[in-house]
Image (cartoon, grey):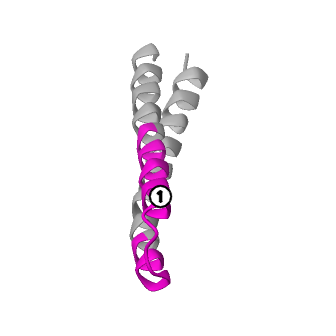
Amino acid sequence: MSTLMWIGIFVTLLGLAGIIGVMFRAIQIKRADLPQDEFRVKLQGLAPWNMGALGVASIGMMLVIAGSILR
């Protein structure tokens, strides 16, 4: 089950990279000095990406835990 743990670690790191990417994109949007409406629309567009990355990281952690339990 060591393979399951390594797959879980990889998937978790992918999710973490996605979360970090969303953070950097949000910082770029904030620094762009956009009008309030456009600012809100752009940040709302990041929400699905953020939730997706969080979901991927969570699935990766579940795989790591499953791999360690089955070990």
The percent coordinates of residue 37 (x first, y second) are 45, 85
Residue found at the very far front of the displayed protein: 33
Relative to the observer, which residue lies in front, 48 or 63?
A: 48
- The residue where tag 1 is placed is 26
Question: Per the image, is 22 magenta?
Answer: yes
Q: Helix, strand or loop at disc 1?
A: helix
Q: Residue at x 49, y 42 (%)?
A: 57
Question: Left of 71 or right of it: where is 56?
Answer: left
Q: Residue at x 48, y 78 (%)?
A: 40
Q: Residue at x 50, y 82 (%)?
A: 36
Q: Quadrant of residue 21?
A: top left
Relative to the observer, which residue lies in front, 44 or 54?
A: 44
Q: Which corner quadrant holds the N terminus?
A: top left
66, above or below 35, in the image: above
Q: Which corner quadrant holds the C terminus?
A: top right
Question: Per the image, is 4 magenta?
Answer: no
The percent coordinates of residue 47 (x first, y second) are 46, 66
The percent coordinates of residue 35 (x first, y second) are 45, 81
Residue type of the residue flagged with mark 1: Ala
Q: Residue at x 58, y 21 (%)?
A: 68
Q: How many numbered marks does the figure carry? A: 1
The percent coordinates of residue 30 (x first, y second) are 50, 63
51, above or below 68, in the image: below
Q: Quadrant of residue 28?
A: bottom left
Relative to the observer, which residue lies in front, 25 or 33?
A: 33
- Are there few (<14), some (14-19), or many (20+) residues within 10 Å of tag 1? some
First to last magenta residue range: 17-42
Instruction: Give the main secondary structure, helix, strand or loop, of the magenta stretch.
Output: helix
Q: Quadrant of residue 15?
A: top left
